[in-house]
Amino acid sequence: MGLALIASAGNAANDYLARHLAEQGYARPVMVASGGEARRRMDGKDFEVVVINGPLPDELGHELALHAVEKTHAGVILLVKAAIAEQSAGRWMEQGVLVLGKPFTGPQFRQAVLIAASCYRRLDLLRAENSRLTDKIEQLRMVDRAKCRLIEQRGLTEAEAHRLIEKRAMDARATRGEVARAILDEMDEED
């Protein structure tokens, strides 16, 4: 299991939240008592779940929740009084913050943790897919640049340049992007 962060000023609440997080596999959550300290901790670590028990001594908590959504990939749970949750939950939930009104039961909190963790994991899959697609686009751009240089400097047709890159990639058991990079490097040395 990953890391969890609890931002809460109450010792009794901290024990309660930590106990329920431990039941979900977050055995040693990082606990902080202020929004400022939570922000500093978020900068250095990749938390799966961030639980904010508002209000905090230095802020209400919703600012920290929005900061966590913007700056981290964590699933963010904001614990606020039921009246505040009813008034503002829609606005915060649109930003990606899970809002849970106090008082709440243990099962409700554990369910919110599961939802937040699943959001983190889903985003993690999307980030990996995004990275893979970005790499593929960069590889295609590299191949296109190499084809253009082969056409311009060596007088090949587009089909001949394409076949040359494909053949070199098969012969070298390399990707087309790697072959394209090598061709561009060769041509830069010739200039």
Image (tube, grey):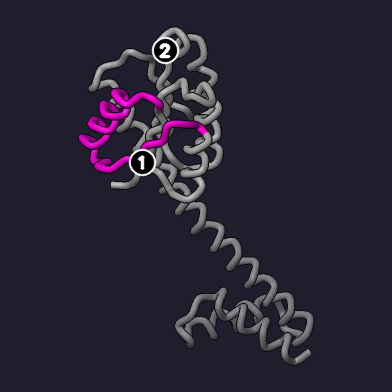
Q: Nearer the viewer, mark 2 or mark 1?
A: 1
Q: Is residue 95 left or right of residue 155?
A: left
Question: Label 2: which residue?
Answer: 81
Q: Residue furthest top?
A: 83
Residue 28 is covered by the magenta coloring: yes
Residue 188 is covered by the magenta coloring: no
Give percent across and percent down for residue 161: 66, 80
The disc, 2 or 1, on the residue closer to the chain's N-terminal end is: 1
Q: Residues within 10 Å of mark 1 (few under 14, many from 20)?
A: some
Q: Which residues are magenta?
A: 9-35
In this orientation, which residue lies closer to the viewer: 91 or 183?
Answer: 91
Q: Amino acid at mark 2?
A: Lys
Residue 135 picture quarter:
bottom right
Q: Amino acid at mark 1?
A: Val
> Is any atom of residue 94 visible in this view?
no
Q: Residue at x 28, y 47 (%)?
A: 1
Q: Is residue 6 left or right of residue 109?
A: right
**Callout 2: SS:** strand
